[in-house]
């Protein structure tokens, strides 16, 4: 019997050694494949390469014609075939995640080109202004080099917009209007921004004259595209709603959740009801403080709305909006450090700036982060301008982003939300997880940090702050309800605005802005709640499993170490 047990033990050891050897061999082969794949990826998608900080192809402008789409499809199919030679069972968990991300990216790219075909109905995807504006704004190499690449890249603009006009077929009204507005706004990159850069440069006078002339031609080409869209006869435009089949598939590719789109929609509906209960409880606690002589309404939603409206009066002025954001960033840093919630790298710059014109029209606040090749470049906190708004609209917007919610917004966008997560993502040892980042993980982390900060005492556990947090979190939940309801269930604008104002307690300006956003995007609005739910569920599961050994800082830093991988993959690694 002893001999038999020894033989069994020896066999198990040998089997494990062989399995580990196979894993090491496969991992080495796959690591070599990834290096080749990434270099080939940047050559195939040069403009994407530049956005990630790989600047070898900065002077190249991809032409969005059928030839390029065919080439992209061939590239994706070729590398999907190459992946078949790897046995995922013999890869490390990290590489299993990487291969899944590559497969999803290649498969979804083919689907976008052959089935979704937004290049036909979304004129807003044709806009060169952002690419060129970044070349002037980001100090990733000497200005003279950037300007010379800028000039070479302009050579492709005529062909770019010619391809755009040829591809557009029955566009939606909403995307057409967005394309006109953003191309108009983005022209500043070729006017004021370029001239300011030329004045600071060391280029010769002849070079400056040539670049200025070429920029004038570029502006004329963009104006021609704007006129083309303005005068386009399209009596029966396509609906911006994409329907159940396209929506479900886009959700699968973009969100990469353990849940389906319909499941997340159902969870969101339930969460909305739960949040209403929590908000009513906070309202009851606050009522006598603010309405001592007034009976509380019996309708819970009316009572909550009255309390929120009262608290929302406290807000900064329009002129001080950006200044207040700048002031709060170091306060958030101090809190995170004091509570030891996670490590913040003080060497990574965060710059608060007015939202560039070419980005206007979708979101009021956003983060523009450098790619993994530009780790030390600036991260920009883009703040939408309200300088030219009429008084009523500006007041509505400022009440929405009142003194409580503005703090939560800064947690979400900056510390320890998007800015922090994206700094960690760039440090990930897997560049695949950085460049193929998952939007639901990125947005979910930012939403998760809002609650996490308040749980750890930010705002001193004040009922006012928690009520406003619930309102903000309700917006995340209602983003999902709105997006699915509009694109799948054909929810009308009137019903959507009613939902946002009456049940999500949003100001009219915010509700109108969200309708505009849902009419020019799909699925992305689901990313906030989906990622948040999956992250919070993972934390809860690990807290239950580890008990007193659970460490919040360790959880945060471990979670963020996996780049911007989908939460379902991170969960597999952290909670096998």
Image: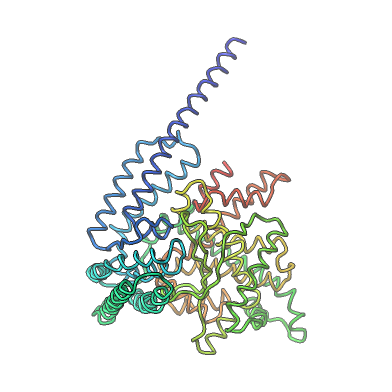
> Could you say where residue 503 lies in the image, as x and y percent from the top left?
56, 74
Tell me, yes or no, if residue 391 can be seen here: yes
What colour scheme does the image use?
rainbow
Q: Nearer the viewer, residue 165 or 177?
A: 165
Q: Is residue 237 visible?
A: no
Query: Looking at the image, which is closer to me, 543 or 275?
Result: 543
In the figure, 224 relative to 260: above or below?
Answer: below
In this rendering, the answer to whether 69 lies above or below 561 is below
Q: How many marks?
A: 0
Q: Quadrant of residue 278?
A: bottom right
Q: Residue at x 68, y 56 (%)?
A: 341
Q: Is residue 87 left or right of residue 448?
A: left
Looking at the image, which residue is at 27% across and 79% down? 220
Q: Nearer the viewer, residue 119 or 237?
A: 119
Quadrant showing the N terminus: top right
Q: Is residue 176 above or below residue 376?
A: below
């Amino acid at each position: 019997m002893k001999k038999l047990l020894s033989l069994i033990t020896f066999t198990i050891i040998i089997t494990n050694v062989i399995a580990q050897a196979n894993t090491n061999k496969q991992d080495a082969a796959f690591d070599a494949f990834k290096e080749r794949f990434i270099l080939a990826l940047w050559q195939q998608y040069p403009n994407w390469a530049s956005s990630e900080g790989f600047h070898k192809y900065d002077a190249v402008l991809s032409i969005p014609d059928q030839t390029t789409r065919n080439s992209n499809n061939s590239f994706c199919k070729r590398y999907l075939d190459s992946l078949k030679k790897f046995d995922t069972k013999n890869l490390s968990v990290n590489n299993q995640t990487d291969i899944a991300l590559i497969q999803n990216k290649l498969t979804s790219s083919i689907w976008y080109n052959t089935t979704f075909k937004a290049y036909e109905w979304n004129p807003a995807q044709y806009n060169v202004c952002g690419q060129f504006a970044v070349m002037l704004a980001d100090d990733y190499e000497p200005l003279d080099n950037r300007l010379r690449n800028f000039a070479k890249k302009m050579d492709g603009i005529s062909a770019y917009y010619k391809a755009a006009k040829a591809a557009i077929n029955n566009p939606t009204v909403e995307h057409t209007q967005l394309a006109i507005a953003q191309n108009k706004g983005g022209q500043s990159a070729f006017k004021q921004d370029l001239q300011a850069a030329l004045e600071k440069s060391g280029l010769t006078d002849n070079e400056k004259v040539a670049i200025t002339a070429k920029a004038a031609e570029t502006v004329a080409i963009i104006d021609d595209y704007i006129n083309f869209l303005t005068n386009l006869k399209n009596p029966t435009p396509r609906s911006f709603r994409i329907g159940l089949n396209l929506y479900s598939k886009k959700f699968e590719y973009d969100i990469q959740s353990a849940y389906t789109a319909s499941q997340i929609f159902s969870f969101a509906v339930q969460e909305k009801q739960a949040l209403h209960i929590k908000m009513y409880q906070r309202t009851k606690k606050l009522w006598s403080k603010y309405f001592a002589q007034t009976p509380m309404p019996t309708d819970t939603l009316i009572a909550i709305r009255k309390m929120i409206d009262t608290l929302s009066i406290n807000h900064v002025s329009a002129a001080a909006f950006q200044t207040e954001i700048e002031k709060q960033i170091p306060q958030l840093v101090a809190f995170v450090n004091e509570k030891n919630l996670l490590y913040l790298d003080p060497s990574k710059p965060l710059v608060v700036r007015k939202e560039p014109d070419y980005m206007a029209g979708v979101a009021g606040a956003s983060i523009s982060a450098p790619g993994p090749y530009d780790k030390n470049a600036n991260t920009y906190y883009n703040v939408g301008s309200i300088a030219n708004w009429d008084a009523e609209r500006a007041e509505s917007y400022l009440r929405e982003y009142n003194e409580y919610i503005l703090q939560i917004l800064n947690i979400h966008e900056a510390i320890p939300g998007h800015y922090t997560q994206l700094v960690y993502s760039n440090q990930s040892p897997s560049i695949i997880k950085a460049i193929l980042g998952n939007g639901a993980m990125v947005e979910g982390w930012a939403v998760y940090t809002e609650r996490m900060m308040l749980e750890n005492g930010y705002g001193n556990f004040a009922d006012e702050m928690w009520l406003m947090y619930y309102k903000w979190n309700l917006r995340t939940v209602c983003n999902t309800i709105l997006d699915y309801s509009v694109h799948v269930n054909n929810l009308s604008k009137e019903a959507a605005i009613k939902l946002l104002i009456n049940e999500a307690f949003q100001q009219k300006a915010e509700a109108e802005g969200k309708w505009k956003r849902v009419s020019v995007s799909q699925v992305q609005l689901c990313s906030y709640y989906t990622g948040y739910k999956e992250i919070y569920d993972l934390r809860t599961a690990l807290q239950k499993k580890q008990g007193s050994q659970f460490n919040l800082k360790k959880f945060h830093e471990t979670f963020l170490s996996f780049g911007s991988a989908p939460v379902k993959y991170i969960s597999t690694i952290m909670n096998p």
